[in-house]
Image (spheres, helix red, strand yellow):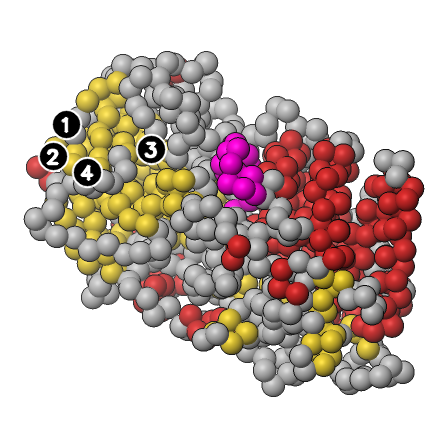
Amino acid sequence: MASRSMKSPAVSASLGPAPVSTDDEGGFAREHVSVPSDGVPLDQCLTREWLVTDGLGGYASGSVPGPHTRRYHGLLVAPLAPPLGRHVLLSHLDELVSGVAGATPVSLSSHEFEDGTIHPRGLDHLRSFELIDGRPTWIWDIGSGGQIERQIWCDTSNPVADASGHHASATHISWTLLGVPSATLQIRPLATSRDFHAEWRGNGDWHFEISPVRKSHTSPPYLDARSAQDHAVIDVRAHQHAPSWHLVATPPRGATWNWDSSSAGWWWNFLHREERARGFDHVEDLYCVGTLSTTMQEGQALTVTATVAAIGAAPNPAPGAGRTVVTRRTASPPRRVSVAASLTIEPPSASVGQVQGDADSRFLEQLRRAANDFIVVRNFSDRHGSGASTGRTVIAGYHWFGDWGRDTMIALPGLTQLTGRVAEACEVLGAWARVVNRGMLPNRFPDSGAQLGEGDYNTVDATLWFIHAIDRIDTMAGGALVDSLWPVLTEIIECHTAGTRHGIGVDPADGLVRCSDGQLTWMDARVDGIDQTPRAGKPVEVNALWIHALSLMSQWADGRGDRQGADRYRVARTRASESFQRRFWCGPTTGGWHRVDGTTGYLLDVIDGPQGNDASLRPNQLIAAALPATPLTRTQRRQVTETVRAHLWTPRGVRTLTPADPRYRGKCSGTAETRDSAYHRGTAWAWLLGPMVDAWMLSHETGARALLSPLREHLWDDAGVGTISEIFDGDAPHTARGSIAQAWSVAEVGRAWIASTPLA
């Protein structure tokens, strides 16, 4: 059975204040991130990572100083079966600036090798790294008072299409010369062709297939038609069975690219230090495909695009259809992440002045940008493997997660509220509805791209989160969604009532939902076949979601004029609610009271399990306290939230187990086995702050925003810059771990941030 923790690596990061830079040259929203020239230790800087995504599941990513620290890093990481089948194709660029009067050549690049050597040391010349309106931007000193600026981006909400109209990954890299009259830029692309979970080693007798440079006289479809000129195109393929990809070099006007193929060949023994720390293979070899060089004049920008799109036959797009090069010295402001024209709502956006002057507004604005990274294209078939169509889904996290049912449904309301992409959210729900089988949503889609099988339907809560998401998105969409999904909704309730896979079904004795497998909730880590948080029985959040679903179904049936159905759902809800209140509440006057210092009551985590009731102090009760339909009094909700605040809350997320429990693990690091054993036994999760804020606001007059505010430091200068990590150590300093960008972390923190905004 698949566990979400299977490929979760550890990421080191330290906490500290987030330096905020203001721009005196153009009014862009900018945030400075620590680099070695700031006096910050290199090892600490190497834990800062940047990420840009392409709307297909592909991305470009690396460490801020330059060396790749993970096998997942690369400049063109393309999904061959979107959003999965991701392959690293272009790993690195080796960049050298020369020809500056009075200065020696300066490398912009930094690579770390197996013996620990870092060469060249472009990081010694790195003056700054910033997010400028969300776009990673580096500036290096190149001598004689000159600097060169580099930016990297993809088109997140509007992925490029190739000549045949198929969506295709593309990464754009631009350089702009500043402060000196001219310089020569030399670029050596370092390539591979591997699954992003693996490492590749070279062979001196094996050479990539590289076409002679050719020219395209029309703009490729992802470049602005206004830049139409001769583009140098280089076709690359590792071998005859490997995917082809292309480098498209666009020089400044009046300049040309020079191409030297004599430098092609293997570069050996690149180190991925994070993989070494995780106990995995951590060395790879890369193939230099040749050398591109051109002369730049001050203020000129040049672009290289790496893409799997077919090049050469596409017509010019309409003027302005592509992304133009943006630097801090351009006259017009850079484009913000766009949203589709067909949306029902438009997210409010702070002005540039407000973004710069107000830390809260800057935080929310960046969360809006980050949220766009997770909504991607997917080809869906129905539950029988037929009727393929293109829809939308949600990538659970970068770098290694695919699209998971539970993550998608928890994240989707917040992602939609942050981005305003309501039409696409409806697509996501409609597409997942097509794969509901026996009243269940799949846990995830196979990484291989294979059809869904029986073993993929192994979650007790994802389907109930699906109903919760439908309610939230239906409200945003104006009420048309429920009617279109009504047959699926009724099937879900019927199958849960009668019983379906894994012993999932309603217990006739009390009307609550039970399951027979301990790995079916979100706490699903398993080590050597042993569940680390066994939750067979009746989990608290599953039954809160079940009661919530019955409440919604009775309302929706009433609205459809189905009084008989509404009464049936209402009766089931009433019975389950009475049982929930009687059986889950744990306090001094109830049976099985398990004393927890500083609290007068809380909710049991699981009842009727193989070992009886589980009184472990965990955060799942927050979900029950956050849902208005759950039969808890205001006093009980207050007791739950204050118990969690005292024992589980951290400045980065909510712990999965109280430190007072002897099973508690305060750090989630080391080998896969040690990480998985800590995954839900103390590790803090940012997404749980969403239900915690909801529950707090149902039971307290003030104080909700204070639960979220410490994450501002994490967003700007810790782990994945400009996004929110998956998990954090339960122990201080609460080091970021897991994936550097997690959909439900961004979504739930952003949604809760909006909900807790003080009224004017």
Lateral position of residue 76 relative to residue 207, left or right: right
Earlier sequence position, callout 4 versus callout 2: 4
What amino acid is found at the position of numbered circle 1 in the picture?
Pro
Q: Is residue 360 visible?
A: no
Disc 1 + disc 2, Cβ < 8 Å: yes
Earlier sequence position, callout 1 versus callout 2: 1
454 versus 600 height, above or below: above
Residue at 77 percent of width and 66 percent of height: 507
Report, in whole angstroms, how far the alpha carbon at label 3 lies from the one at label 4. 18 Å
Q: Name the residue under label 1.
A: 212
Q: Is mark 1 on a helix, strand or loop?
A: loop
The quarter of the rendered structure image containing the C terminus is top right
Disc 3 + disc 4, Cβ < 8 Å: no
Q: As rendered, which of 600 and 1 lies closer to the eye?
A: 1
What amino acid is found at the position of numbered circle 2 in the picture?
Ser
Disc 4 + disc 1, Cβ < 8 Å: no
